[in-house]
Image (tube, rainbow, N blue to C red):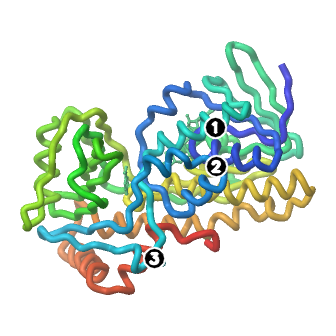
Amino acid sequence: MESRTQVGIVGAGPAGLVLSHLLQREGIDCVVLEDRSREYVEKRVRAGVLEQGTVDLLTELGLADRLHREGLVHQGIELRFDGEGHRIPFEELAEGRAITIYGQQEVVKDLIAARLDAGGPLLFEVDDVSLDGIDTDEPTIRFKHEGVEKELHCDAIAGCDGFHGVCRPSVPDGVLSFNELEYPFAWLGILAEVAPSTDELIYAPHERGFALHSLRSPELSRLYVQCDPEDSLEDWPDERIWEELHVRLARDDGWTLKEGPLVEKGIAPLRSFVAQPMQYGRLYLAGDAVHIVPATGAKGLNLAVADVQVLGEALTKYLKGGDGSLLDAYSDACLRRVWRVQHFSWWMTWMLHRFPDDDGFQRGLRRAQLEYVCSSRAAAATLAENYVGLGRDW
Ligand code: APR
Ligand code: PHB
């Protein structure tokens, strides 16, 4: 069965969904294809820090009512080590720009509901997605839906199908270059039904490994401990997780960490990855399909949204005005920001984690960087402005 649209979007994560709303606002037809069920993508626990720019865009698109009602605005984070806390005040150091704590799956829920309410085509549980003619002006997406073979003819395809999707591998060999760094540790993340023990995120480098106290709501805490990438959940019974969190997050002024029942637990590797260029023919890659950042900088979702903000504008100019100049420059426009965010995320990971093969010199460098960030206004400002997001001119 054949059909036609202007933009075929593969993947209903933050990148694909935000792009669908940007194009819809411009009156451009698009179809979103997702291979998982609605229930699965809305339940998938991921990170939860939104940059100022991401919140501003979702607000502009009229998609942020629940975010503003339930999201928690933070004006700073704490770096905690040697039993002491060091606050990085965004209000002072980042011109009052802030972050908002709001789970990625909540963002995805809101975007899906708005897309379906507006009658925008969004197909879940599609199978066997494959791309054809991406080096022509009329690319095609083939897929199966409800057991029926389908062909979607497009003017352009947006590959928003994440790291393990089919779009990036559809680019012929030799076109893309791959830059990656695997870190010798992973994060064990938990979601606990207990009121957060902090009002702002706590990043804690420790000789036993990094720990992070984040949150989801006044009733839900989100916490992470650095662990060995070979570890399995069997190696981490709940008691051991809490024990490590108490030790690594300890503060000498009697601060205490509240425990509660775990509702989610998972181990995720940390890696840095960039494939470039971010386009081939009429296929445009965005988000995790083309770059991965370690979670330490809380940038994954925000980088995906920033990509499609550029792509949305470029597709609009091409499809409404026939001017392909922004589309041709899409990759270059994004890569400058992608590499800035890659550097920040690597830098935060390097500074805050214990590397298994650390020698005294490496430990000394990390310590010196940490103390500098906590004692120099200029260094703290660098962290603050990157953390809240550098804005559209990047
Ligand atoms: N066909 C259709 N959909 C697919 C396919 C496929 N072959 N392969 C993957 N998908 C879907 C996935 O199920 C997922 O819903 O594409 C979507 C990709 O979404 P994300 O992985 O969330 O990627 P992205 O939208 O780029 O958002 C990046 O997500 O993983 C986090 O930390 C990451 O926060 C970052 C954000
Ligand atoms: C989260 O809330 O899940 C979170 C916060 C900050 C990070 C990573 C994850 O750096």
Per the rendering, the mark at residue 389 is none
Q: Amino acid at mark 3?
A: Ala
First in residue order: circle 2 vs circle 3: 2
First in residue order: circle 1 vs circle 3: 3
Q: Which residue is mark 3?
A: 94
Cα–Cα gap, marks 1 and 3: 32 Å
Can the viewer see residue 275 in this picture? yes
Q: Quadrant of the C terminus?
A: bottom right
Cα–Cα gap, marks 1 and 2: 9 Å
Q: In the shown orientation, is residue 156 left or right of residue 238?
A: right
Between residue 206 and residue 70, name the one nearer to us: 70
Q: Quadrant of the N terminus?
A: top right
User: Residue at point 30% right, 61% down?
Assistant: 200
Q: Secondary structure at mark 3?
A: loop
Percent position of residue 270, x then y: 38, 52
Percent position of residue 349, x then y: 35, 63
Between residue 71 and residue 346, name the one nearer to us: 71
Q: Which residue is mark 1?
A: 114
Q: Secondary structure at mark 2?
A: loop
Whether pointer 1 and pointer 2 mark residues with C-beta atoms closer than 8 Å, the reply is: yes
Percent position of residue 220, x then y: 29, 42
Q: Secondary structure at mark 1?
A: helix
Q: Amino acid at mark 2?
A: Gly
User: Residue at point 64% right, 47% down?
Assistant: 18
Between circles 2 and 3, the one closer to the viewer is 2
Percent position of residue 175, x then y: 71, 54
Mark 3 Cα-neighbour bin, 10 Å: few <14, some 14–19, many ≥20: many
Between residue 200 and residue 273, name the one nearer to us: 200
Q: Which residue is mark 2?
A: 62
